[in-house]
Image: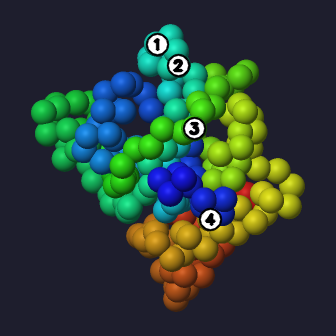
Amino acid sequence: MENLPSASDLVLVAFLPEPRDFDIARLFGWYRIPLRTAPKVVAVDWLAFYQPATFGEGHKWRIEYVAPVIGHELSVRAELFKDEPDHPHAREEYFKIQLGPLAALPRPIPAGTWKRVTFLYTTGERLLKAETINDLTVYDDERAVLWRALRERALERQQYHVMNYPEFPIPPEVIAMFGLMGSGERFEE
């Protein structure tokens, strides 16, 4: 299972709005997340794609595919979709997540009672053992370990701008360590 997550890999379950977005990930190797609604950390090992009702019978409300994350960058929508320069969100910033090849999970993970999924952090182990999306949720002591790993990953691989921080000498690493990521939001434990 070399093309699937390992047990300790960090996985972000991400909403795939339309089949067109699946084709972009599969053919062009990227996925977009609006910066204004992005999860706190996008520097993960894998994306798992949640497919809503737009994927039709037999493919809706489930996770069928994963892709390794190669990197990420900030872009504006107009750069991602050059054929849509007049789109209402054309000037908005997006994370462009660069992906490796998509891989089908050994068995799809149905939503069960969850029908509205946007972003959810989990581990490779939970992803590969899950019977439903509810099984991806990390609880108790494991949750603290997951958040610690996400914090470390953010410090290692994610760049945060300090334009909204007070003008006194606090190193960006210290600010990031306490979860102050530009909007005043904090990591929760």
Give the residue pinned by disc 2: 60
Residue 106 is marked as 3
Mark 1 to mark 3: distance in Å?
20 Å
Residue 70: x %, y % from top left: 38, 61
Q: Is residue 129 left or right of residue 77?
A: right
Task: Evaluate whether residue 14 shows in this view.
Answer: no
* Quarter of the image where one finds residue 115: top right
Residue 150 is marked as 4
Q: Is residue 138 left or right of residue 68?
A: right
Which type of secondary structure does the marked residue at label 4 adopt? helix
**Callout 2 amino acid:** Lys
Task: Evaluate whether residue 70 shows in this view.
Answer: yes
Q: Earlier in the sequence, mark 4 or mark 3?
A: 3
Outermost front residue: 1
Is 180 or 114 nearer to us in this picture? 114
Q: Nearer the viewer, mark 4 or mark 1?
A: 1
Residue 188: x %, y % from top left: 73, 57
Which type of secondary structure does the marked residue at label 1 adopt? loop
Which type of secondary structure does the marked residue at label 3 adopt? strand
Give the residue pinned by disc 1: 56
Q: Earlier in the sequence, mark 4 or mark 1?
A: 1
**Callout 3 amino acid:** Pro
Mark 2 to mark 1: distance in Å?
5 Å
Outermost bottom residue: 169
**Which residue is rendered at x = 47% and y = 53% of the image?**
3
